[in-house]
Image: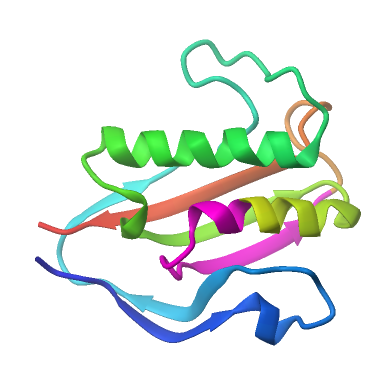
Amino acid sequence: MMTHTRIRKFNTSDTYPEQNLDNDLCQAVVTQGGKIVWLRGQCPQNLEDAKNIDSHDPVEQTHKVMQNIRQLIEEAGGEMAHLVKVVVYITDVRHREAVYRTMGEYIKGVHPVSTGLVVQALARPDWLVEIDGTAVIPE
């Protein structure tokens, strides 16, 4: 079974020592073959009915977002180890640590590449975080 090559793995506790973060990331991921799963930006809502979760807490919202990402990758026939990239959108830089620490629980040992942005707003005013991802499931 093909495994993705993760180039220059690191943990954010080393690269951002001033922040209380513990995320396994890398600078680049090399994939070859396989099935690519392009995920829509996932928000703190249920996949079944698109209803928002009843929380304005960035940790709870991030748990829901990451659970959705995991569920969609699994529905495509993969697992979180196949995640290669995430793009994190937050509406308040003060939520960064909470969002990234929570996301880190789901990507421990995975080492995807990651881009983070602070944006003015997301599609619904209650949303504090949106994360999109890409996974490559080996053939």
Relative to residue 22, is residue 45 depicted above or below? above
Where is residue 43? Give x, y as percent. 62, 33
Residue at 65%, 76% in the rendered image: 12
Is 104 inside the magenta-drawn segment? yes
- Residue 112 horizontal side relative to residue 116, left or right: left
Residue at 30%, 38% in the rendered image: 74
Q: Residue furthest bottom?
A: 8
Specify the segment rendered in magenta: 103-119
- Residue 61 horizontal side relative to residue 57, left or right: left
Where is residue 108? Give x, y as percent. 48, 63
Where is residue 124, by image quadrant?
top right
Residue at 60%, 53% in the rendered image: 103
Colour scheme shown? rainbow
Residue 110 in view of the camera:
yes
Relative to residue 38, is residue 27 depicted above or below? below
Where is residue 113? Give x, y as percent. 50, 70
Residue 41 in view of the camera:
no
Q: Quadrant of the C terminus?
A: bottom left
